[in-house]
Image (cartoon, helix red, strand yellow):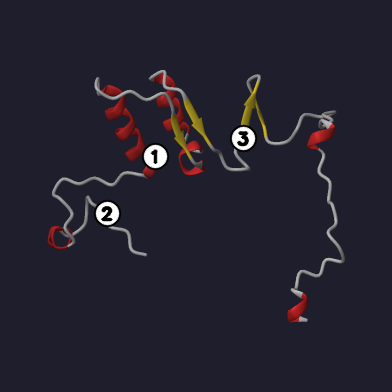
Amino acid sequence: MQWISFGTAQPARLAEAGVPQGSVFATKPELAWKMIERAADDVLLSFGWVTGDEAYGDNAVLRARCRGRGLNQVFAVSCDHPIRVAGADRRTPPAGHTPHPRQRHSHPRAGTGNKAHPAAL
């Protein structure tokens, strides 16, 4: 994959590719914020929530901007994303934490473990 640096790229190549003059590179969260901001400023548009997958939820700037605008938000975050609890980052449960019985994982067995269809054997 080849990345084009808009500031140093050759203008002829950009024009040939159909890139409008003055275009600036933006990440997906940056583009999402522009769309959210435009929608929030539109008096004819009403929405209750901003949602996104972990590509957006892992972006602290996007989440902070949504909070700053007072927007309700639900973003997924990656499984290794730090969670702030009472001012401290947590990646693992605190010492002495015992999971609720429903949270304990069980490994039920469904036979001998042979997943092949009987006709394929």
Residue 19: image x %, image y %?
A: 18, 54
Query: Disc 3 designates what residue?
Result: 82
Residue 87 falls left or right of residue 65: right
Query: Disc 2 designates what residue?
Result: 5
Query: Disc 1 designates what residue?
Result: 29
Rendered-image quadrant of the C terminus: bottom right
Amino acid carrying mark 2 in the image? Ser
Of 25 and 10, which appears nearest the observer? 25
Please say if 26 is above or below 8. Answer: above
Badge 2 local density, few (<14 within 10 Å), some, or many (20+)? few
Residue shown at 75% from the left, 73% from the top: 116
Q: Where is residue 27, by image quadrant?
A: top left
Residue shown at 27% from the left, 54% from the top: 5
Amino acid carrying mark 1 in the image? Pro
Residue 17: image x %, image y %?
A: 18, 61
How far apart are the alpha carbons under marks 1 and 3?
Answer: 19 Å
Residue 80 falls left or right of residue 29: right
Q: Secondary structure at mark 2?
A: loop
Residue 20: image x %, image y %?
A: 15, 50
Badge 1 local density, few (<14 within 10 Å), some, or many (20+)? some
Q: Secondary structure at mark 1?
A: helix
